[in-house]
Amino acid sequence: MKHPDGPQTPRWLQKIQWTLDPLGYMDAATQRYGDIFNASVVGNYPVLLLVSNPEALKQIFSGDTQAITAPSNRVLQPVMGDYSVFVLEGSRHRRERKLLMPPFHGDHMRAYGRLICDLTEKAMGQITPGQRFAARTLMQTISLEVILKVVFGLYEGDRAQQLKQGIVAFANTFKSPFVSGLLFFPSLQKDLGPRSPWGYFLRLQQQVNQLLYAEIRERRSAIADPSSRQFDQSTRSDILSLLLSARDEAGGAMTDRELRDELMTLLIAGHETTATAIAWALYWIHQLPEVQKNLLEELDTLGDAPEPMSIFRLPYLTAVCNEALRIYPVAVVTVPREVREPMELMGYALEPGTRLYGCIYLTHHREDIYPDPKQFKPERFLDRQFSPYEFFPFGGGVRRCIGEALALYEMKLVVATMLTHFRLALADSKPERPQRRGVTLAPADGVKMVMQGLR
């Protein structure tokens, strides 16, 4: 039995289409080939299937065992490193994931609530009435502050400022289609000097690496010297402290290289995606007056100084954030899966070596699940509950994003704080469109807004 059909254009041309216009590529392919099609857009796999059928996705995500495995993400390896949770497989991946999970859940996460609200008010307070600003840039500043707190704890000083600047500059290289495109063409990842796209990328990466290694060395020295009061390890719950104290089955600690890769992963993935999601939510809220009106009415029911968890539980705010994640998911596909044993999927016999990607964007735009999928309608999330195979902006299965809870928490608190205290408007009527930013999609113009004053 043959594998699913797909676009017949040359592989190199499909990769260019995927890099420059992934949504157009997917829309055209699913219209012609349906819920599963062969797409030669990542790597050099003879069979790489994009899947948007919920029942097939359920089989894929629940089959993360013997027949289907979650291999490393080679596209992100040059960015995150060989020891990133994105790249590790099997028992190593499970161990790292278990180590990284606690600060993103429960009491740890709730402790960040007031910090998120305060950082948002502080950032917005620096914008004067009539001033224009790019919402995504401002959200990047706020979300980077939050993730630095989560990763490093109470973190201030010259190195912190240098790290913020370095991470932003490094992440912003992906605004360039030349750098983003090189992630999908490994053979072109050549250092041709500081002015070449990949050479510039590598030099910015090295600057961030130096700062991370310096922080790791300093923290190790503090642990080795019990008299040091600079870092009281016993009272710290930040991720770096947890990783420094972690031991494997043989009692071995993580190496500096392993620590660096996990820190880079959390710092980049932990603020880039959240900033984009918040910017999209702000765009739709201010693009659609009825949505803004409904949201403000709900926020006003909480009074002047609501608790962060009260904000988090608001149903219409939750629906607005979910709809923003549905219509333009930050990641358009899940991380890859690989078929290890012969299996059947949607009537097709799949051979070992077949690559599978759950297609988040196409599933989120299915007419049978989301009528009028191109329209922004938060009410659809009030009218029914969607399964994790119908709505999965953070991926699914064993590779589901570990920062999902913190991202949603931050997204809701930032949006609520901005709307409650400030009057904002879009700076122009030009529709915002998604554009590739590394392996994600972000608003092409950054959602230009104008401050109208206090509310």
Image: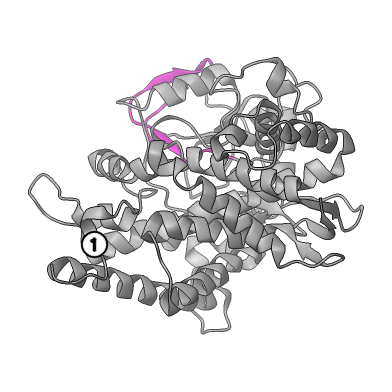
Q: Quadrant of residue 409?
A: top right
Q: Residue furthest right?
A: 429
Identify the residue shown where x is 10% and y is 44%: 249
What amino acid type should be assigned to the residue bearing mark 1? Asp
The residue most toward the left is 250
Q: Is residue 330 left or right of residue 265?
A: right
Using the image as rendered, state which of residue 365 and residue 400 is in the foreground: 400
Which residue is labeled 1 in the image? 232
- Is residue 281 shown left or right of residue 190? right
Q: Is residue 1 visible?
A: no
Could you say which quadrant of the image residue 68 lies in? top left
Q: Which residues are magenta?
A: 333-353
Residue 384, quarter of the rendered image: top right
**Magenta segment: does it hold 453?**
no
Q: At which x and y percent is residue 157?
A: 43, 76
Q: Is residue 255 left or right of residue 167?
A: left
